[in-house]
Amino acid sequence: SQQGEEDPQALSIQEGENATMNCSYKTSINNLQWYRQNSGRGLVHLILIRSNEREKHSGRLRVTLDTSKKSSSLLITASRAADTASYFCATTMKTSYDKVIFGPGTSLSVIP
Amino acid sequence: EAGVAQSPRYKIIEKRQSVAFWCNPISGHATLYWYQQILGQGPKLLIQFQNNGVVDDSQLPKDRFSAERLKGVDSTLKIQPAKLEDSAVYLCASSRRIRTAGVDTQYFGPGTRLTVL
């Protein structure tokens, strides 16, 4: 099975609400990243959190990492319709060449 | 800086035909990745190059897929012969490989959507 698993698979919220997505993984990591993918387009890097960090902010994004539970969460505050997209966590495993594995993603719909 | 370029953007072929995809990474990026993304799933790494050497091709179906990266810059991914289950988006990504910082942010191209009929 994949290294990263996102939860929930799909999320629908009203504009202005907060959206929280979770990612769990199985083996030790160097870092964890979150990417966004709009329909029919490539992935865009959102934020990276290193294994020795617990929380990181970028604009309306807040990422937490709990290495003891092997889990991460992505919080999008004050969501906008433009946030509608699929969100993927990607874990960089501790290998000689930094192997990156993507989870199956969370599909977020923000209703205007 | 210019992003990762891929071509073609769309391709429709019959099963058992051959197809090739091209990728031009961001200038100066040493690492290049090819991913397969089936609808509704996350990207699956097919092959990872460090300069022009392969560091991971464990999930590449080598009986039908091949990839090369000549001179450590552009790369091509080929499928021969294609099967119905190869229908997917093929994403190319590159990264700078700043190992001292322990980070490896990947920059993705727009992808090639392949439909095998």
Image (spheres, coloured by chain):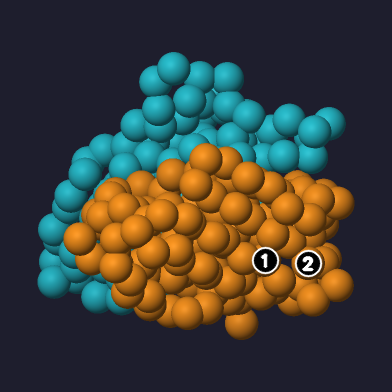
Q: Secondary structure at mark 1?
A: strand
Amino acid at dot 1:
Ser
**Residue A58, placed above or below residue A107:** above
Q: Amino acid at mark 2?
A: Asp
Q: Which mark is residue A109?
A: none
Disc marking residue A66: 2
Q: Which image quadrant: the C terminus of chain B?
A: bottom left
Of mark 2 and mark 1, the one earlier in the sequence is 2
The residue drawn where x is 60% and y is 53% is A62
In the image, the chain rendered in cyan is: B
Asked which quadrant contains residue B99, the reply is: top right
Q: Chain of mark 2?
A: A
Front residue of B29/A79: it is A79
Asked if one can make out residue B81 in the rendered structure from this viewpoint, the answer is: no
Mark 2 crowd level (few <14, some 14–19, many ≥20, 10 Å Cα): some
Taking the image as shown, residue B4 lies to the left or right of residue B53, namely: left
Chain A appears what colour? orange
Q: What chain does badge 1 belong to? A: A
Say what secondary structure mark 2 lies in. strand
Q: Position of residue A53 (x, y in %)?
A: 81, 51
Q: Which residue is mark 1?
A: A72
Instruction: Kindly check if marks 2 and 1 are in contact, taking CB atoms under 8 A apart as contact.
Output: yes
Res A73 visible: yes
Give the image location of residue A33, x and y in percent: 62, 52
The image shows residue A101 at horizontal and vertical percentages of 61, 62
